[in-house]
Image (cartoon, helix red, strand yellow):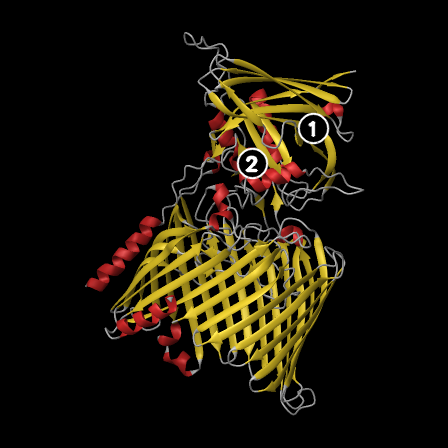
Amino acid sequence: MLKRYTYSILALVCLLLTGCDRIAEDERLIYDPIVLEDNQNDIPEEGKPEQTKRVVLLEDFTGQRCVNCPKATDIIEQLQEVCGDAFVAVGIHGGPTAFAGNANVVGLKTDIGDEYYTHWNLEYQPVGLVNRHAPINYTEWIEAVKEELVKPATLRLKGTAVLEDNTITINIDAQGTNGTVDGKLQVWLLEDGIKALQLMPDNKPADQAYIHNHVLRTAVNGTWGEDFSIKEGETERRTMALDIEPKWNREQLSIVAFVYNDQGVQQAAKTKVEIIE
Amino acid sequence: MVACLCVLGTKAWERKGVTFSGSIQSDMLVPRHDNGTGAEKTGSFLTNTYADLLLQSQYINAGARLEFLAYPLPGFENDFKGWGVPHFWMKGNIGKAELTVGTFYEQFGSGFILRTYEERALGIDNALLGGRVVVKPIKGVTLKALSGVQRRYWEWNEALISGADAEIGLDEFFPVLRKNGTGITLGGSWVNKYEKSDEKIYLSPTYRLRLPKFVNAWDVRASFSRGPWNVMGEYAQKSDDPSFANGHIYRKGSAAMLSGSYSGKGLSVLLQAKRSENMSFKSTSVETKSIGISSAINHLPAFTQDQTYALAAFYPYATQLAEGEWAYQAEVGYNFKRKTLLGGRYGMNVKANLSYVRAIDRQFYDGDNLVQKTNGYTSKFFKWGDDTYYRSFDISLSRKLSKAFKLNLMYVNQRCNQSVVKGHGGIVHTNIFIADGKYQFSPKVTLRGELQYLRIKEDQGDWAYGLLELSLVPHWMITVSDMWNCGETNLHYYQGLVTYNVAQHRIQAGYGRTRAGLNCSGGVCRMVPAHTGWTLSYNYNF
């Protein structure tokens, strides 16, 4: 009798757990768009400065020998299209799949890219840091960007960059908008439109003329930036200069500035380098 | 000290009718920076240390394992780091049933839908934590049921894995089969993954996926044996399981295998074929955690030779679970008898293996419709895809040339698609020549030597390898080896090891360089970075 009960219970458990969960084709997708908070026109609380929207920074650790990295780039392009200037992506060529180049092939790997890759203890590519939180797979970037976009901004950040002769003069203007922010200000130089080799996914042949955008070229103010602190209502300007290298295309340069601390990136801004002939 | 305590403890327990046994395994490395190989000094002292304890009595067995991996050896995934007692279990025998509570390993059939196991060299331990019942109600019938959560390094994945398996040996029911020496075994399994995940996977900034809470997999198998013949077939299927591995498609996975073997006097033949597609089955839908070798619920064996010689193992193959593959393997072995023309005075053994792994046909939807994209692809069952993933042919000849000298010669030819196996590197072709000789000077003194040469046009070019191993029975073994890249870098990867065995203890100390490369076992691989330094290994069984 006991045996019979045992077998019956086992069979019942099996049946209960075999829940069929096939999702019909027309139910596979859930409409869940990114909504950009436009709080620029909100009336600020009394005594508080005008609020600003949060700009989200994505550090994309990529490599020319990384076959899935073009898939990550697709995600970035989609986010750029939807989010506009509320989203800033930086392609950091470092780690095992980055390519340093040789006499025949252009390489985009940088020592600073390797340093960041090692610092964040990354173990595969593509992988990204959204507002300097834990590294995540590129398929999770959209969700992470959505979550960051709705967080309130604590400061306003704006940059200008002017290239005259071979020197870029950069001004970063900040205004505290919500509490005090202590951290680091980091400024990077990026280049768009670089035509160079890229391995492609799904066993497709390598693309010799792949266009690499938002490629990190160098850090303007050191690998980890400079100390920065701002109180609500205060404004501050930081000025710095950078000599450009001949291999960089001066028409395609831009500056990314961001303030970060242990809680992640607090605010970011991107500006194109203006050329004065 | 620990060993002495274990011995004293064992004796005390034995007096109470309880057997106490266990083992300690500790591999240590003092890494050094090496400008030549680019090896980094990743710490001052690294170790992977395991201590297993087992208590056995008439009705109840219990065990636990301490793992100290806080400063792990190079090449393991970040989350591998940690320490604790991740294994603890108790097993009771009640009549014809056996009940396990705690952590356990299990495999249904060939492992197509469930295989939890430990492979320390790769850092794999995907044990289940929960309960398992194994019942043998009558002779020839084994029933299993289990449920639990799966280990992922130092945490337990949220998905609940449940399953059942039944296996029947028909020869126990039909005496005529037994009388004819015929064995027929039928089996069937089912596995269910239940996961209520918070993971949001977006196909675009506007649409995200509705992920299934349940994923089911089933498997049927049959084996027939008679005399030297054995035939085995198995088929498994898995329900829609959109994941990072399969590109988030809603498509069934499947695996089919047919294997036949003959093992007669002096001759052995093995023929195998397998087709699999979309069979990556993981116990977490968190994408960042599902990447890598952790959290696998199932395992598909690679139909390729697991090479043991150093240069032959340079370009291994890893089973393509998500992409799928057609895999074939044929192996023939023959023992030439002693005192025959080819066998000579002491006989000779010849073995040949041919492996071929090919992509399956997959026709992907190429439009912009997101829903259509989630269907993935269409595939004709018997049609091949364009790419050859791996091809290998090897032949080995083993012969005793004199009473004291034994020689093993081997030739390996490989074509490996590195872009498939490790993501980049293109196709490489190798020709590998190996000679392995062993000379016994006296019953206590044996010298073994290996010479290997790898000829390759791609990657880093040719490699040569030499090894000498002196065994002084019963305690000592001294090994020196050098792996030389004579094709491009001119680097030497030298190594010296001294091994001492006494009673149940084994201690090995050495110094050397290890090259960066893939370390594989059973079709699963991990990338090991170059490292240099002093090594010490200690093993103890009590």
Query: What quarter of the picture does the C terminus of chain A occupy?
Result: top right
Q: B477 and B393: which one is in front? A: B477
Question: In the rendered image, which residue does mark 2 sit on?
Answer: A128
Please say whether residue B7 is visible from this viewpoint. Answer: yes
Callout 1, which amino acid? Glu
Q: Residue at 50% x, 65% y: name it.
A: B537
Mark 2 residue element: strand
Q: B440 and B386: which one is in front? A: B440
Position in image of residue A29 (x %, y %): 48, 33
Q: Quadrant of residue B432?
A: bottom right
Position in image of residue A247 (x %, y %): 77, 31
Query: What quarter of the picture does the N terminus of chain A occupy?
Result: bottom left
Position in image of residue B193 (x %, y %): 40, 49
Dot 1: few (<14), some (14–19), or many (≥20) neighbours within 10 Å?
Answer: many
B478 versus B187 height, above or below: below
Does B87 sit left or right of B375 as displayed? left
User: Disc 1 sits on a residue from what chain?
Assistant: A
Dot 2: few (<14), some (14–19), or many (≥20) neighbours within 10 Å?
Answer: many
B539 versus A198 height, above or below: below
Q: Are marks 2 and 1 on the same chain?
A: yes
Please say whether residue B382 is visible from this viewpoint. Answer: no
Question: In the rendered image, which residue does mark 1 sit on?
Answer: A191
Callout 2, which amino acid? Gly
User: Disc 2 sits on a residue from what chain?
Assistant: A
Residue projecting furthest to the right: A103
Q: A237 and B462: which one is in front? A: A237
Does A105 sit left or right of A241 as displayed? right
| Mark 2 vs mark 1, CA separation in Å | 19 Å
Position in image of residue B66 (x %, y %): 38, 58
Does B189 sit left or right of A111 as displayed? left
